[in-house]
Image (tube, rainbow, N blue to C red):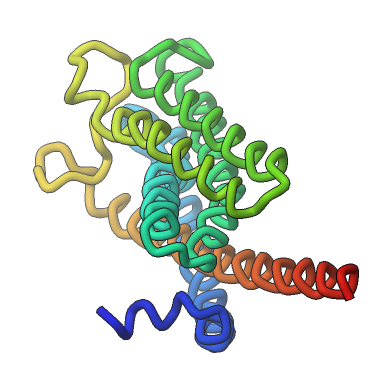
Amino acid sequence: MSSLWEYANPRKFMATSGALLPWVSGLAVLCLVGGLFWGFFLTPDDFRQGSTVKIIYLHVPAAIMAINVWLMMLVASLIWLIRRHHVSALAAKAAAPVGAVFTAIALFTGAVWGQPMWGTWWEWDPRLTSFLILFLFYLGYIAMWEAVENPDAAADLTTVLCLVGSVFAVISRYALLFWNQGLHQGASLSMDAEQNVADVFWYPLVTCIAGFFLLFLALVLYRTRTEIRARRLRALLAQERTA
């Protein structure tokens, strides 16, 4: 495990992320363009949902990433709280806007799908409601980083917010198990073959999920590098003022 913590060193992180970023970015573009083109143009319409089914190529990956980005932020924040590694706190900060955008995409595409399927743009379904609350937690997390001037204090406070928000991340994922009521359908990807989507939709969907994950990874690497540079700049300016 000692080698893992080496990447908490800003210099080590910058060197490694700089080498990885072009590859991760290229794979993200390849998977996203290929998966979305495959899904939207090369798959048939569903016999029940028609062409509306193709929203899953945006909605499902965005929803999966929205939940998992928050959990990644929780892990990074806890590492900061326990080990006081600044890179982990900055990575959590960098991930928040990306996760917020994924959550917004999932909410919007869900509404677009729900209107023809359910006859309404919105329903206070347990999963939809918990997902909306998760989006508000994302906004609150971003706002707290901006509102607290001391970076270490902001990292501590946002860690607490991450812990609370994780409850809604878990509820968003498992709402259908907690409540039998609700309009939202079951998981599109499941270990149960009877609940899984057909292979003709499954393969491009998995490609899109990989693309969204790689896009997230590329954006977080890029944004974390930016946060590290900004932290260095603030430290240099502080030294000049005290000199």
Q: Residue 2, how many percent across, how many down?
A: 29, 82
Q: Quadrant of residue 225?
A: bottom right
Residue drawn at point x = 49 percent, y = 11 percent: 120
- Residue 42 appears in the picture as rendered: yes
Horizontal relation, residue 195 to residue 27: left or right? left
Count the labels in the image. Answer: 0
Rendered view: 228 above or below 67: below
Q: Residue 14, how many percent across, how many down?
A: 58, 82
Q: In the depicted view, which residue is nearer to us: 65 or 37?
A: 65
Q: In the depicted view, which residue is nearer to us: 75 or 190?
A: 75
Residue drawn at point x = 52 percent, y = 47 percent: 99
Q: Quadrant of residue 50?
A: top left
Residue drawn at point x = 23 percent, y = 24 percent: 176
Q: Residue 242, how many percent across, how many down?
A: 86, 70
Q: In the depicted view, which residue is nearer to us: 39 or 207?
A: 207
Horizontal relation, residue 127 to residue 90: left or right? left
Rendered view: 78 above or below 108: below
Q: Residue 224, how many percent across, how many down?
A: 60, 67
- Residue 72 appears in the picture as rendered: no
Residue drawn at point x = 68 percent, y = 50 percent: 150
Quadrant holding the C terminus: bottom right
Quadrant holding the N terminus: bottom left
Farthest front residue?
Answer: 243
